[in-house]
Amino acid sequence: MQMLSRNPAAAYRRVALEARIEASGGADLTRICLEEAWAALGQVQAALDRSSPPPSEPLTRAQTILLWLAQSVAPEHPLRPSLVAFYGGLASQIGAQILHADAAVLEQIRSDIRDLLEAAG
């Protein structure tokens, strides 16, 4: 409840996201995860654009999401090896950004995620 009093907009977004996740499965859940990783990286990029120190929490969140996606690809999925390598590679790149974020690298990672979201429809 304390979170609600400190940042009601963030609390509402969190509740809405949790409801969306509960109502989803399969491809929809993957899309939500990719959207969340993309948004988290956008927060870091915005900080870098303002010449502010990049927050580590959104980087950690994006990395965790991508690691989860890599582990959750169905064994029978025809693109499983490629998707696991793709998600794992992005998670590794994000991990390298936690101590020293580079705006160009983050933009490339966001671009890769955006391309995947567009391909998914």
Image (cartoon, rainbow, N blue to C red):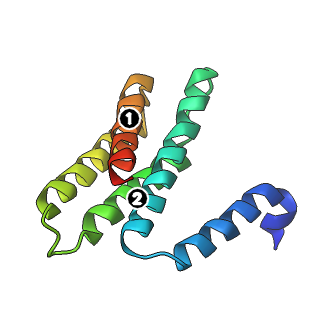
Instruction: Please name the residue that numbered disc 2 is placed on.
Output: 64
Q: Quadrant of the N terminus?
A: bottom right
Q: What is the spatial separation of the Cα atoms under label 2 and label 1, in whole angstroms?
A: 18 Å
The image shows a total of numbered marks equal to: 2
Residue 82 in which image quadrant: bottom left
Residue at x-position 30% and y-position 45%: 90
Q: Position of residue 64 (x, y in %)?
A: 40, 59
Query: What is the crowding at mark 1: few (fewer than 14 residues within 10 Å), some, or many (at least 20)?
Result: few
Compare marks 2 and 1 and give the one earlier in the sequence.
2
Q: Residue furthest front?
A: 121
Q: Secondary structure at mark 1?
A: helix
Residue at x-position 62% and y-position 26%: 52
Query: What is the crowding at mark 2: few (fewer than 14 residues within 10 Å), some, or many (at least 20)?
Result: some
The answer to whether residue 109 is left or right of residue 74 is right
Instruction: Please name the residue that numbered disc 1 is placed on.
Output: 111
Residue at x-position 23% and y-position 47%: 89
Q: Amino acid at mark 2?
A: Thr
Above or below, 85 against 28 in this view is above
Q: Amino acid at mark 1?
A: Ser
Return the mark for residue 84: none
Q: Position of residue 63 (x, y in %)?
A: 39, 52
Residue 63 in sight in this render: yes
Foreground pick, 100 / 21 = 21
Above or below, 61 against 2 in this view is above
Label 2 vs label 1, nearer the camera? 1
